[in-house]
Amino acid sequence: MTEPKFINTDGAPPGVAPYSHAVDCGDYVFITGQLPIDPVDPDSPLPEGIEAQTHLTIKNLQAVLTAVDLDLSHVVQARVFITEFKRDYAAMNAVYARYFPTDRLPARTCIGVTGLARDALVEIDLVAKR
């Protein structure tokens, strides 16, 4: 059995809690939930609106995937957490859908939550397969 590798990358924002950006378990890589935080200036305000926040969140996920030599085409499962479900679900979906071809959509759960770190509107975590 391959030992897990705990990955952190400068390409993604630093953690807001004690965690690794990803855990590489051989065939599967588990990507920690990413927020819409600017990796270059993590203390800057979050972007306005669900669309901008979803774009930046996915860009941060792409940075973590790149650090383990993968990309969004390897994603098999996603979990999306949004704080304003009724208001933002459709707009978040419109942005999210731009990143995945219709014939390679990962399995997904979308959950409405009462709050996220930094008062973000969205957080997304992933599972990818080599």
Image (spheres, helix red, strand yellow):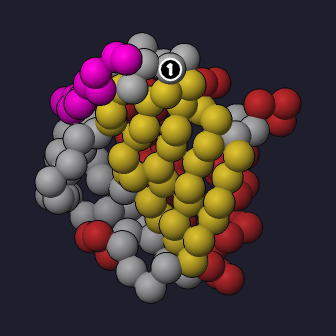
Asked whether residue 101 is in view, the answer is no
The residue lying at 19 percent from left, 58 percent from top is 16
Seen from the viewer's position, the closer of residues 38 and 82 is 82
Report the predominant secondary structure element of the magenta stretch.
Answer: loop
Residue 13 is left or right of residue 26, and the answer is: left
x, y (%) of residue 8? 21, 32
Q: Please state which of residues 81 and 119 is positioned toward the viewer in this rendering.
A: 81
Locate residue 48: give its quadrant: bottom left
**Vertical side of 118 occupied by 101: above or below:** above
**Closer to us: 19 or 122:** 19
Q: Is residue 41 visible?
A: yes
The residue located at (42%, 38%) in the rendering is 30
Residue at image position (50%, 20%) is 27
Q: For the C terminus, which image quadrant? A: top right
- Which amino acid type corresponds to the residue marked 1 in the rendered image? Asp
The residue pinned by badge 1 equals 27
The percent coordinates of residue 85 (x first, y second) are: 62, 79
Q: Which residues are magenta?
A: 1-10
| Residue occupying the far right of the picture | 103
Residue at 56% across / 25% down in the picture? 129
Q: How many marks?
A: 1
- Horizontally, residue 60 falls left or right of residue 39, namely right
Q: Position of residue 62 (x, y in %)?
A: 45, 32
**For residue 4: magenta?**
yes
